[in-house]
Amino acid sequence: MTRNVALGLVLGTLLISCGDKDPDDTAAGGASSGDGADADGDGFDSESDCDDADPSVNPDATETWYDGVDSDCDGGSDFDADADGHDSDAHGGDDCDDTDPAVSPSATEVWYDGVDGDCDGASDFDADGDGETSAVCLSYNETEPLANMSMGGPALTVSYSFTPTTDLIVTGAELWTGRDTGSVDIGIWSHDTSTGQPDAELSVGTFSMVRAEGWQGATLGSSVALTAGTQYWIVWEPINGAISPGTSSGTQQTYFGSWDFGGSWFGPYTRAHRLRLSCPD
């Protein structure tokens, strides 16, 4: 009788210990003991680990883009680093900038910001698609007869005043010149209301002057937003002996000269000149 009681107690204890196991108890490494194994020992069981044979692949891993492996198991394309829904064009996709989610074939183009926002490969400065990136938007004395004068003195800088009647985004500046060759700077400057002279350079471009007389100028280094009714200056550094853009009649401009690249100005003078500005078309 005593032996039967003792045996019963032992069997009861074993049954209780097996039946009382905590259902929320998990195996080491984060793998649920009731759900799946963690074959690669990376702390994630086979239900959450998209490759349980590779410990470097799991939801905690850092994604390595463009290697063809979904390292962090997020289900996204390994060739779409900016997650905009378009794979990189360097890996068979159509996204021309896979670092910027705002740039993709699905994006709306923002013209004249220098970014091909919709990845169509066209110039960002040709909104009408006619193959021309700019058009003349402001001009003076295009058909007036030239005064046939030459620019004098090395290191000369000349500035011509103008005031637009509408707001403009200017991308280029030109004037009528020639008769010599060499590198020439031309730009747009702001106006100093206290002195009535040019104040500071807003943008500048460089062109190679040719001997043939005609419109010559440059695309500016950056576009300049001009406000209607505000005075500005076209400033250039002519080559000694080049023909002046001055005309014998037409709309006159106030102009100044400088021997120290705009550090100080002499003048003012008044004459009509052939000048024009270009804006995005």
Image (cartoon, grey):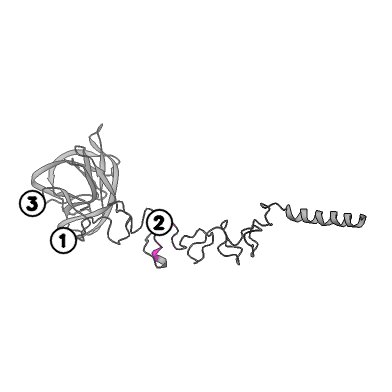
Answer left or right for 226 relative to 96: left
Mark 1 nearby-residue class (10 Å; few <14, some 14–19, many ≥20): few
Residue drawn at the location 47% of the way across and 64% of the way down: 66
- Position of 170 relative to 120 (above/below): above
User: Magenta-highlighted stretch: main secondary structure?
Assistant: loop
Separation (CA) of disc 1 from disc 2: 52 Å
* Coordinates of residue 103 in the picture (x, y in percent): 36, 55
Mark 3 nearby-residue class (10 Å; few <14, some 14–19, many ≥20): few
Q: Nearer the viewer, mark 1 or mark 3?
A: 3
Which amino acid is tagged 2? Asp
Residues in magenta, as a range: 79-89
Residue where numbered disc 3 is placed: 143
Mark 2 nearby-residue class (10 Å; few <14, some 14–19, many ≥20): some
Residue 258 visible in the current orientation = no
Residue where numbered disc 1 is placed: 212
Residue 5 visible in the current orientation = yes
- Mark 3 and mark 2 in contact (Cβ < 8 Å)? no
**Where on the picture, by quarter, is residue 177?**
bottom left
Which amino acid is tagged 3? Thr
Mark 1 or mark 2, earlier in chain: 2
Q: Which SS class for mark 1?
A: loop
Comparing 30 with 248, the one in front is 30
* Coordinates of residue 150 in the picture (x, y in percent): 15, 51
Q: Nearer the viewer, mark 2 or mark 3?
A: 2
Comparing 219 with 83, the one in front is 83
Split into 4 quadrants, where in the image is the N terminus? bottom right
Residue where numbered disc 2 is placed: 84
Which amino acid is tagged 1? Ala
Answer left or right for 191 relative to 70: left
Separation (CA) of disc 1 from disc 3: 17 Å
- Mark 3 and mark 1 in contact (Cβ < 8 Å)? no
